[in-house]
Every structure is written in structure tokens, then in C-alpha cells.
Amino acid sequence: MLNIPQLKNNYWTKLLNRLVILFLACFFGCSGSDPKIDNVKWSMVETIDIAEINSDLENGKPTIDVGVYFPSNLDPSFKKVTLEQVIDGFISAKEIYRPTSVQLNLLWVKTGNIDERFLSIQANKIPGIPRTEYVNMYEHMKRNPSALTDEASMAFESFIEPSPDNHRTVYLVVLQDVFFPFLEVSEGRNWMIKTVRTGGLSFPTYSYVNSIPLKHRGVISLTNLSRPDRLRRTIAHEIGHKAMNVSHEYLGMNPEHEIYAEGGLMIYGKGEEIPSGKSGRWHLERLLISPFVYKQKLNERKIWNPDYMEGGHYYDPIYKEYVVKFEGSKVIDENW
């Protein structure tokens, strides 16, 4: 005698199996695979005297490790950054940080052919939520962190060589163009997308928080050192974004995407000061406790500062009292 319920069960089981097989075949056969990412084959630049550059280092002092990646296949028409300028800028950065007692240790300078797709990149995805008056810039960034574009993620994956200290090392990567999109009020209650062509970009954790992989959080791009002011300050300024973990701000000036004034290293101008104390927005104090900083006595291992507890947003608990609380700014008419 036929078992009708059993026949029905068999029918639906077979149909489900066929649908699963069809789905898998379509998924793996029809969907495009990710572009292949080849790791760059870097080699040391032997003409750079690393020992001479590091001859000023002292055992036991706060130190930041820095590596330099300089592509060998930059377009011939690209003249904004030379290897000599990178070294000169690094030496200037050492001088700028010397009054803080933080020293910069050049690990190596390497060169190699990179994928030409990555000579120019867009740094982050276009933001979706504009900043309004309810919270300040840092609080807004914590809630709505920047996110790397897929292109930038692939580029960093191909550039950065695996190391246990990837998340503690600063990597200066020379590229031809890095574009940074952000939202700005146009008129009334309307925002527009603006894109800035950067001369240097630090990919700081106050902006990206947990959205940037640990192994890539030390990347700093360099795309223009051609002017004397850029040559002198850019590397020091970008390391400041990374190690102090602050935006463009100084004394009574709350952070903004762009601030042009004189005095401080962390604003656009000619200033080189890294101020301390509450009036100085705790820049020196934040620098000294940065997770990118370590101390090392002769023949002993590196002792790193504690790492971020919450991804490295501006108010991360590692900073304790070394933060500034401030109100959000009114970006549009309150009677909108």
C-alpha cells in the first residue's frame, strides 16, 4: 500500500536538494571572483644609510618605529615625491619631535613594483551620515567611523608585509594620489560630497576606529612633498594624527577637517609646537601614551604602551583624563 505522506516527503526532499545544487552552481559559476592580489616583492634600498639616520637614538627613550615603502614604478610624470624628499622629511620629523623626548626609529626603506591600480586610490567610502550639532566631531566619528574602500583595502593588503608588530609600526607609503571624500554643508539643510586631493593621509583611529584592520592601522600615505612647507612638516604632521590621535586642532580651536593658522603642528600652517596640558588639548600627553610608542633598554625587548581598549576612538579609555569635552557645532540654521 502506498504511503502518501512518505511520497510527499521524498518529493520535497529531492526538490530541495536540486534547488540547493542549482544555487551553489549559480553562486560559484556565475559570480565574479575577487581580483587577484599579489603581494609586492619589496627589496631594501641599499643606498640609504639607516645607521647614520638612527645615530641619534638613545636607549630607554620613547620610540616610534617607521618603515618606508617607495614604489619603483611611479609614472615618469609624477614629480611630487622623491626618495630624497622622504628621507629629508623624516629627518625633519625627528627634529620636530625631539623636544617631546619621542624619537623616530627608521626600520628600513624598501622599493618594488606595485599594482598600477593602486598608484592612485580613494581612501574611504563616501560617508552616509553628516555631522550635525548634537555631538562633536569625535563623538560623531565614533558612531559613524570612516571605512576603507575595497580598493584601499586591497592596496594595503598587497603593500604591508606580515609582522607581529604590524599594528604598532608606522608605514610611510608613497603613492601618486589619495583622495579623501567627506560631507560638507552646501546651503540650507543640504549637504554635498567634497573630495580633497591629499598630500599626506594618516588613516587615524579616531576616524576609522575598528573599521580598519589592525595590521593596516599604521599606514600613512605620502603624495606631495614638493613645497618647502610640505617637505618640512608633512611627515611629522601625519605621524601626529596617528600617534596623538587627534584631528586638526590647536589650543582653543576645536577640530575640523581643515584649519589654517599658525602655532601648532596639528593645524595647517608653519607651526611645529606640540603643546601639553589642558590648554594644549593634551597633545604631548596623548603622544607619550600612544600604542605606537615603546621603550627599549640595551639588549632588552621592547616594552610597548598599552593598546587601545575600544578601537582607538578619541575618547578611548586609555586616554583617561587626556581628552577635551566640547559641544557640537551648529552647521546649519537652527530654524531649518
Image: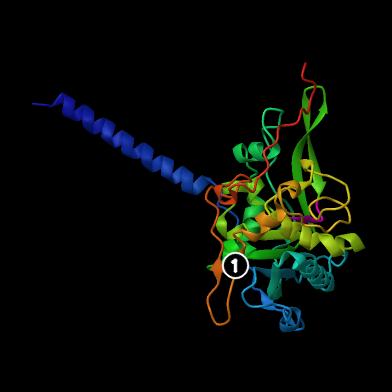
The residue lying toward the viewer, choosing from 28 and 213, is: 213
The residue lying toward the viewer, choosing from 142 and 253, is: 253
One can see residue 275 in this view: yes
Compared to residue 271, the image places residue 333 above or below, namely above
Quadrant where the image shows the N terminus: top left
Identified by mark 1, the residue type is Tyr
- Residue extending farthest to the top is 335
Q: Is residue 162 magenta?
A: no
One can see residue 202 in this view: no
Quadrant where the image shows the C terminus: top right
- Residue extending farthest to the left is 1
**What secondary structure prevails in the magenta region?**
loop
The residue lying toward the viewer, choosing from 136 and 214, is: 136
Q: Quadrant of residue 85?
A: bottom right
Q: Is residue 204 left or right of residue 31?
A: right
Residue located beneath label 1 in the image: 294
Q: Quadrant of residue 230?
A: bottom right
Neighbor class of circle 1 (other Cα within 10 Å; few <14, some 14-19, many 20+) is: many
The residue lying toward the viewer, choosing from 19 and 174, is: 174
Residue 298: percent from left, percent from top: 58, 81
Name the secondary structure under disc 1.
Answer: strand
Q: What's drawn in magenta, residue-wise?
A: 198-202
Residue 83: percent from left, percent from top: 81, 72
Which residue is located at x 85 percent, y 51 percent?
268
Residue 64: percent from left, percent from top: 66, 67
Residue 313: percent from left, percent from top: 61, 46
Compared to residue 255, the image places residue 264 above or below, namely below
Compared to residue 329, the image places residue 173 above or below, namely below
Which residue is located at x 66 percent, y 64 percent?
170
